[in-house]
Amino acid sequence: MYDYLIVGAGLFGAVFAQQMTQAGKKCLVIDRRRHIAGNIYSKEMEGIHVHMYGPHVFHTNNREVWNYVNRFTEFNRFTLGTIANYKGEIYSLPFNMYTFNKMGGVTMPEQAEEKISMQRREAGITEVTNLEEQAISLVGTDIYEKLIKGYTEKQWGRDCRELPAFIIRRLPVRLTYDNNYFNALYQGIPVNGYTRMVENMLDGIEVRLGVDYLENRAELDALAEHVLYTGAIDAYFDCCYGALEYRRVRFETETLEQSNFQGNAIVNYTDREIPYTRIIEHKWFQFGKDGRGNDLPGTVVTREYPCEWKPGEEPYYPVNDERNNQLYARYRELADREEKTIFGGRLGHYKYYDMDQVIAAALECGRAELGR
Ligand code: UDP
């Protein structure tokens, strides 16, 4: 008999399990997949930690979260600066003075500001109700057309006018020359990979892999007093109100016999015609560009092809538009009435969480459980 059955060995499940175990509770962690770490799972290929489910760069302003993760791994000093390739033209991301300079020749922040306001006025935007209006208001029409529209429509499979504005606000807009992708005090990549970090969190905790909770629910529920469920919330309730929508990503990974393929960890392909959204060159997350990365003879690159999720596949991104959020709210009501089970994580909360938000939520959830 366990105090907690934890469904999902991803970040939320691992942090929760760690906290509960530390407090003297007996936990069993299960996962449908044959590995731990959920979608932050990394695997070593050619001496390089490959991010098997898309690039993950740890960043946070939350000191408690930063101190917490540092108990389980050391971080390198990686800072993400993404490059956008639009039909062979290279732009800096996130949107900053380097981007504004390359796009419109402006050199001073005031000129950039003027240009953005003019394009916002020309587009007739007075109120922001969707991603397109938000994007034009923040960076102007030129940048929207070349760096946002195509990428976003590929990524989400929806028109920018049908998407919520918050998605584009994930990216900073700066009137300074600064290519740091995040406004975060703490940033880095675990030096031994994300999988090792999660393994350390789960140290001494029983983990069973290849176990599908939803297919063996009665039997598994009987093992524990409480359940933490981090899978998709709609699937938990047999999609009784209809299915929530998710975006999935298909990855094409290859090893190349060259030391440097694209000179950066992430290059986004922002035009509509190229079917993938970005190419990841994994070694640059792990090694500094002036260090061991150059000495490795090979490199591993991944192309990301976003697509709509279908049952039986791995979901990656919740589609937090109004229709899906309303549907989620109905599932949330059912979830709140469950006595034995609590819900967590990107899929359990149907929220576009970053890793630090997942950890903060899991720590909070652990505290709430222990206080009850
Ligand atoms: N985005 C864009 N162009 C880019 C990069 C991002 O339009 O070159 C938009 C796009 O809508 C994307 C969102 O910004 O879904 C958030 O980007 P982020 O890099 O945070 O996405 P993630 O790494 O979580 O997939």
Image (cartoon, grey):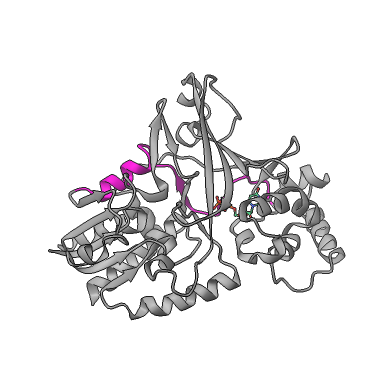
The x and y percentages for residue 305 are 58, 44
* Residue 247 in view of the camera: yes
Q: Quadrant location of the C terminus?
A: bottom left
Q: Residue at x 68, y 54 (%)?
A: 153
Q: 145 or 122, which lies in front?
A: 145
* Residue 73 in view of the camera: no
Horizontal side of 338 relative to 117 (left or right) equals left
Quarter-wise, where is residue 333 in the image?
A: bottom left
By secondary structure, the bulk of the magenta-drawn segment is best described as loop
The stretch drawn in magenta includes residue 202: yes
Q: 44 or 188, which lies in front?
A: 44
Above or below, comparing residue 8 to residue 276 in the picture = below
Horizontal side of 276 relative to 340 (left or right) equals right
The x and y percentages for residue 220 are 22, 62
Q: Residue at x 47, y 78 (%)?
A: 330
Magenta-highlighted residues? 176-203
The x and y percentages for residue 304 are 57, 42
Q: Residue at x 48, y 76 (%)?
A: 329
The stretch drawn in magenta includes residue 364: no
**Residue most toward the right?**
122
Q: Residue at x 72, y 53 (%)?
A: 149
Above or below, comparing residue 175 to residue 134 in the picture = above
Q: 18 or 97, which lies in front?
A: 18
Q: 147 or 289, which lies in front?
A: 147
The x and y percentages for residue 334 are 39, 78
Q: How many marks?
A: 0
Horizontal side of 275 relative to 8 (left or right) equals right
Above or below, comparing residue 107 to residue 362 in the picture = above
Q: Quadrant location of the N terminus?
A: bottom left
